[in-house]
């Protein structure tokens, strides 16, 4: 039996090159568009509020500035900086204080006393709980707005050339993981003969090398990525040590250790396992490799789950194992798809049985992806408005659409797989037919060296004939084209999936925009700062009263009063009284008599404010036996 390839169409040698070129061009186009349009990675924790608020004008200088975030963050010494109109530090240059309570994430920095009037700039930078750097700035004014000389860097945290290289490494890490895990699973579960195939070995080893190199790059760039944005700081040992003390740093180091175990797995898979001929021993070794490789693959997947989206937000204890399952299913499906594509184009020995086994593995992976994807979508989006109105939701819709396209193409592949059975068997039978005279001539040759040379030539000729026959098979060609189309869609799908990991979840974005209580500072109340000038009419009777009420909510509050003379220095007075009245509810006046703490400073603890509302605060100041005045100002409390 003989067969020849059709005259029309590209030759078998050119087809693999064309396939590789097409995939390379597609990868370059997709990643180029994504990196050009995405900019710095979107923040996963969001600033939900501050005190003073952005653009606020306060009468008196606050004692501290507080910032509220939608989720947990990591801060350092200079994470929050307050700059006066001239650009000098107005804060005490200390590490921010953690003021978080319950689900409220809040940090604050203390300010110097006696700050002059003008516009102040608050610049902040931190690391979100899911490993991404975040930054921002806003202004507030004391007394009245003024010009400011503060020039903040326009580059966001995680941006610039360092951010681009770091993002490329993130994409490469996911791609390497898919090839490493998916390729190994394909060999063990679908095509054991692939352990001896050089193209399959190269695919898995290149996946390991890509993931290892990308992880090393991310570890070295982690410090400048979250900080200075300078490549030179990649080799700062102090910065590297600080990275190792963080959750993302620990995850990257853990991944490197697991990749060491993966290297041993690869050596056994393509060494001892590939050479093993006894079927019983090979079956036992297959089970051992499957268990060991599964443990290593699960551990590597967990390094993403423990440091990104799944590790923060609601139901983190459930989300992390679900994320691990999702990643493993992606690797088994897409990595197996890449392995099948390489096997169809580069090896002549893969048969229809291996293709059918991969079809079953792919179906199981899709089931797992559907179940875990639905849960992840609910957790990260949470509402229809977030699905359609946020960048994360829109990317998720695109991902679902790509999966639908991939499943449609996979359906055609399954049809080609069904047709492949008989034609593949016939091709194998035809390829095994060799002239008896050639075999006899080899065995009859008295020169062993010449006999070995002829045997190698005969084996090469047989492989070439087998490949020619398979390439001429229309069913096999149809399957290869279908698998190539699947791989092309899978490349785009993997890129979109990676983008999702660097985009603020829709649920978080909506909560930040709405300022919901679960994601922001307390819904009601906040410290009250008042500034009230007075004039009793007597000698040295002019001055200013400054009042702070904390926390400025219903219940118990601390009240501080400062009096400054006309020269701006602390001023003592013989008598100071306060009264609080909520006129809308006919409550009050509630008298408050503060105790003197120091020159020009009085305080009262446990001041009870029974109800939220617009309270009128009356202040009576007596500067002599006969000179006295009562002033008032309204403040919203609670």
Image (spheres, helix red, strand yellow):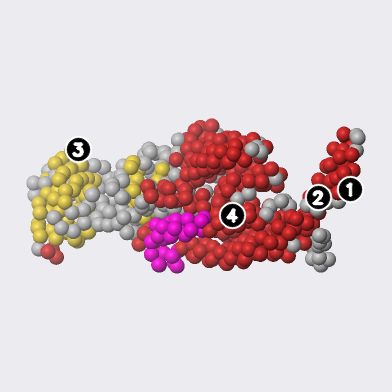
Of marks 4 and 1, the one in the foreground: 1
- Distance from label 3 to label 1 (Cα)? 115 Å
Task: Tell me the residue at 19%/61% (across/down).
Answer: 614
Of marks 2 and 3, the one in the foreground: 2
* Magenta segment boundaries in residue numbering: 364-391
Sequence order check: which comes first, mark 1 or mark 2?
Answer: 1
Quadrant for the N terminus in the image:
bottom right
Image coordinates for residue 507, horizontal then vertical, percent: 39, 59
- Distance from label 3 to label 4 (Cα)? 83 Å
Whether 380 is among the magenta residues is yes
- Distance from label 4 to label 1 (Cα)? 39 Å
Residue 7 lies, with reference to residue 212, above or below; the image says below
Sequence order check: which comes first, mark 3 or mark 1?
Answer: 1
For label 1, the crowd category at 10 Å Cα-Cα, with few meaning under 14, some 14 to 19 and many 20 or more, is few
Check disc 2 and report the residue beneath it. Answer: 462
Of marks 3 and 1, the one in the foreground: 1
For label 4, the crowd category at 10 Å Cα-Cα, with few meaning under 14, some 14 to 19 and many 20 or more, is some
Could you tell me which secondary element the residue under label 4 belongs to?
helix
Sequence order check: which comes first, mark 4 or mark 1?
Answer: 4
- Distance from label 2 to label 4 (Cα)? 26 Å
Image coordinates for residue 590, horizontal then vertical, percent: 10, 54
Task: Tell me the residue at 38%/50% (across/down).
Answer: 318
Relative side of 21 to 255, left or right? right
Could you tell me which secondary element the residue under label 2 belongs to?
helix
Task: Tell me the residue at 77%/62% (across/down).
Answer: 472
- Distance from label 1 to label 2 (Cα)? 15 Å
Check disc 1 and report the residue beneath it. Answer: 437
The quarter of the picture where residue 356 lies is: bottom right
Check disc 3 and report the residue beneath it. Answer: 598
- Distance from label 2 to label 3 (Cα)? 101 Å
Could you tell me which secondary element the residue under label 1 belongs to?
helix
Check disc 4 and report the residue beneath it. Answer: 357
């Amino acid at each position: 039996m003989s067969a020849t390839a059709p005259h029309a169409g590209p030759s078998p040698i050119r087809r693999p090159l064309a396939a590789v070129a097409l995939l390379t061009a597609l990868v370059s186009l997709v990643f180029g568009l994504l990196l050009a349009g995405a900019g710095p990675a979107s923040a996963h924790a969001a600033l939900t509020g501050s005190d003073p608020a952005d653009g606020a004008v306060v009468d008196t200088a606050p004692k501290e500035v507080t910032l509220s975030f939608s989720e947990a963050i990591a801060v350092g010494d200079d994470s929050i900086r307050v700059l006066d109109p001239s650009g000098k530090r107005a804060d005490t240059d200390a590490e921010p204080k953690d003021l978080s309570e319950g689900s409220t994430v809040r940090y604050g920095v203390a300010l110097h006393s006696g700050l002059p009037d003008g516009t102040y700039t608050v610049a902040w930078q931190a690391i979100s709980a899911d490993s991404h750097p975040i930054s921002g700035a806003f202004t507030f004014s004391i007394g009245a707005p003024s010009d400011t000389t503060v020039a903040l860097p326009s580059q966001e945290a995680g941006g610039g050339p360092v951010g681009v290289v770091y993002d490329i490494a993130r994409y490469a890490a996911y791609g390497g993981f898919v090839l490493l895990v998916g390729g190994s699973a394909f060999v063990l579960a679908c095509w054991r003969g692939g352990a001896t195939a050089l193209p399959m070995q190269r695919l898995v080893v290149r996946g390991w090398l890509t993931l290892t190199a990308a992880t090393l790059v991310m570890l070295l760039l982690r410090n400048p990525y979250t900080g200075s944005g300078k490549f030179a700081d990649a080799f700062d040992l102090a910065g590297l040590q600080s990275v190792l003390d963080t959750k993302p740093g620990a995850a990257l180091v853990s991944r490197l250790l697991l990749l060491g175990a993966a290297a041993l797995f690869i050596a056994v898979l393509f060494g001892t396992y590939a050479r093993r001929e006894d079927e019983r021993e090979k079956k036992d070794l297959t089970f051992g490799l499957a268990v060991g490789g599964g443990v290593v693959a699960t551990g590597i997947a967990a390094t993403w789950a423990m440091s990104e989206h799944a590790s923060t937000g609601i139901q983190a204890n459930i989300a992390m194992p679900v994320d691990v399952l999702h990643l493993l299913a992606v690797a088994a499906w897409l990595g197996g798809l890449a392995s099948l594509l390489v096997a169809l184009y580069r090896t002549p020995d893969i048969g229809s049985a291996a293709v059918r086994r991969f079809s079953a593995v792919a179906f199981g992976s899709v089931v797992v992806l559907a179940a875990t994807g639905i849960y992840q979508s609910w957790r990260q989006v949470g509402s229809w408005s977030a699905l359609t109105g946020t960048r994360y939701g829109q990317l998720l819709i695109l991902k679902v659409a790509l999966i639908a396209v991939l499943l449609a193409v996979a359906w055609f592949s399954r049809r080609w797989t069904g047709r492949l059975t008989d034609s593949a068997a016939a091709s194998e039978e035809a390829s095994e037919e060799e002239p008896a005279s050639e075999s006899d001539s080899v065995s009859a040759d008295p020169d062993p060296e010449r006999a070995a040379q002829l045997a190698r030539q005969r084996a090469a000729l047989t492989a070439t004939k087998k490949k020619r026959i398979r390439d001429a098979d229309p069913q096999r060609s149809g399957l290869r084209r279908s698998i190539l189309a699947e791989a092309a869609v899978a490349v785009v799908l993997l890129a979109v999936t990676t983008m999702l990991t660097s985009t603020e979840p829709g649920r978080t974005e909506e909560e930040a925009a709405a300022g919901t209580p679960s994601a922001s500072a307390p819904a009601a109340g906040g410290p009250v700062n008042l500034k009230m000038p007075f004039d009793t009419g007597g000698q040295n009777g002019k001055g200013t009263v400054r009042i702070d009420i904390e926390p400025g909510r219903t219940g118990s509050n601390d009240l501080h009063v400062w009096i400054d003379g006309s020269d701006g220095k602390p001023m003592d007075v013989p008598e100071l009284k306060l009264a609080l009245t909520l006129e809308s509810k006919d409550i009050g006046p509630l008298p408050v008599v503060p105790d003197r703490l120091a020159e020009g400073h009085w305080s009262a603890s446990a001041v009870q404010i029974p109800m939220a509302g617009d309270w009128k605060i009356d202040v009576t100041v007596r500067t002599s036996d006969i000179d006295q005045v009562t002033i008032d100002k309204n403040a919203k409390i609670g």
